[in-house]
Amino acid sequence: MTSKYLIKNATIINEGQSFTKDILFYDNFIQKIGNIKVEPDFNVIDGTGKYLFPGIIDGQVHFRDPGLTHKGDLHSESKAAVAGGVTSFIDMPNTIPNVLTVQTLADKYELASQKSLANYSFFLGVNGDNIDEIINTDTHKLIGVSDDGLYFTKKGNLLADNPATMEKLFANCKSIIAIHSEKEQIVEENETIYRAHYGENVPIRFHPLIRSEKACFEATKRAINLANKHNARLHILHLTTEAESHLFRNDIPLKDKNITTEVSVHHLWFSDKDYHLLGNLIKWNPAIKTEKDKKGLLKALLDDRIDIVTTDHAPHTLDEKQKPYFQSMSGAPMVQHSLNCMLEFYKQGLISLEKIVEKMCHNPASLYRIEKRGFIREGYYADLTLIDLNSTWTVKKDNILYKCAWSPLEGTAFTTKVIQTFVNGNLVYDKGAFNESVKGLALKVNNIN
């Protein structure tokens, strides 16, 4: 018998509105929203003064499982996720083995069913080697295909560098095609210049000049032109430049967009000013860029040129991060703290709660056509996050849940806290305690166009 939960008097943020109602849920789903009478078998939660969001859907993570589990795994990183109010995630294909076949994809789903505390889905990887297999796959059943992270395996795996491969994919693939958009040729030319001056110890402050605005902009512009030519569904991952943001539309609703994009929370939080203190800890690809870019990305998020917020959560060990520039791994863990970052922007008056929910809950569900998630509606899965907007705490070693045991946000004081996280109606996170007896479910894709 599943527990019946009744949350009373919480301020619900949903579909552009803020209102106070009760919400009853059990057997995985939201049963009723309204003024609900307490019954003897209800577990009643007093939400007075608290805020209730749909569970956050993180559209881009690297949980490292299988093959790279010294950095993180589906259990450890999903545990960190639910502590941060994230109830669903979509994981990238650059594990070992790379997820380049339907069988490898199926194996990863099976692994997640045994280990993940949050709901899950996975991109099928695509590169020049498996393009024909992708084309011959019933791709409309997939949440998406992606090349992200596969450039770590070998050079030449980025679709942005292979317009012929990209065009072939755009002409034939029926799912979302999510790409890492940088021109490696430009990046390599810049690397040669800086290596000539500094050898292997290039100062990290040059990272955004090596992985430059030009490398990003030219790749994104070309990809959009090719996608429009073939009416393909293109999603540009982790946008980093203000210049690129002007390539995207906001004059049509998300449901009518074939070309979409996202911003990862660290590109809103950090700028090149932070390399001085944080160094390689904030080395990401694409790079964190200027204060102007940071502000431009937030503006594009607010005016709907940017559709969703993700984390690009990518744990590495501290040893892997603290190597010389060319050897230091790119990426950092963020999934436990992404909602807190966005809520700090709210506290600063930069974004509304309704907009945060739109970009972190509603739009990921709509963009990826995820069934019955991302909204607080009767009949939808009870993925819910209860938040205290007036609770101060500091990110420290002893409250970081990532397996890699560090965060670029260590020492940051947040003024909001996730109190409880429900996944499919189960109380998985409760004021620092976890229920690990229940596991998340595979996200289902609605294939109706």
Image (cartoon, grey):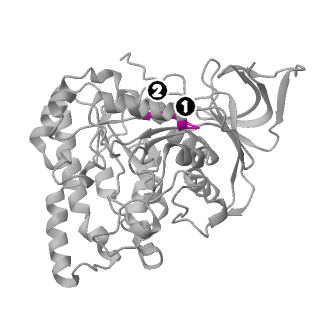
Instruction: Name the one closer to the observer, 347 or 381.
Output: 381
Residue placed most toward the observer, 94 or 161: 94
Residue with the most extreme bottom position: 197
List the residue tagged with mark 2: 370
Q: Which quarter of the image is occupied by the N terminus? A: top right
Within 10 angstroms of label 1, few (less than 14), some, or many (20 or more) residues?
Answer: many
Residue type for callout 2? Ile
Q: Position of residue 225 (x, y in %)?
A: 17, 40
Q: Which quadrant is home to the C terminus?
A: top left
In the rendered view, would you say 211 is above or below 42? below
Q: Is residue 54 visible?
A: yes
Three-letter amino acid code at disc 1? Gly
| Residue 185 is a magenta residue | no
Name of the residue lying farthest toward the left: 164
Per the model, the C-alpha gap separating discs 2 and 1 is 8 Å
Contact between marks 2 and 1 (CB within 8 A): the answer is: yes
Disc 1 is placed on an element classified as loop
Q: Measuring 28% from the left and 80% from the top, which residue is drawn there?
A: 201
- Image coords of residue 88 (percent x, y): 53, 36
Give the side of residue 293 with respect to residue 326, left or right.
right
Position of residue 304 relative to residue 397, above or below, is: above
| 54 in relation to 418, above or below | above
Query: Where on the picture, by quarter, is residue 327?
Result: bottom left
Q: Which mark is residue 374?
A: 1
Q: Residue 188 placed where, x, y %?
A: 16, 65
Which dot marks residue 59?
Answer: none
The magenta span reads 115-121
Residue at the spot x=50%, y=43% of the render? 74
Residue 413 can be seen in this image: no
The answer to whether 418 appears left or right of 176 in the picture is right
Q: Position of residue 58 (x, y in %)?
A: 49, 42
Disc 2 residue crowd, few under 14, some 14–19, many 20+, Cα 10 Å: many
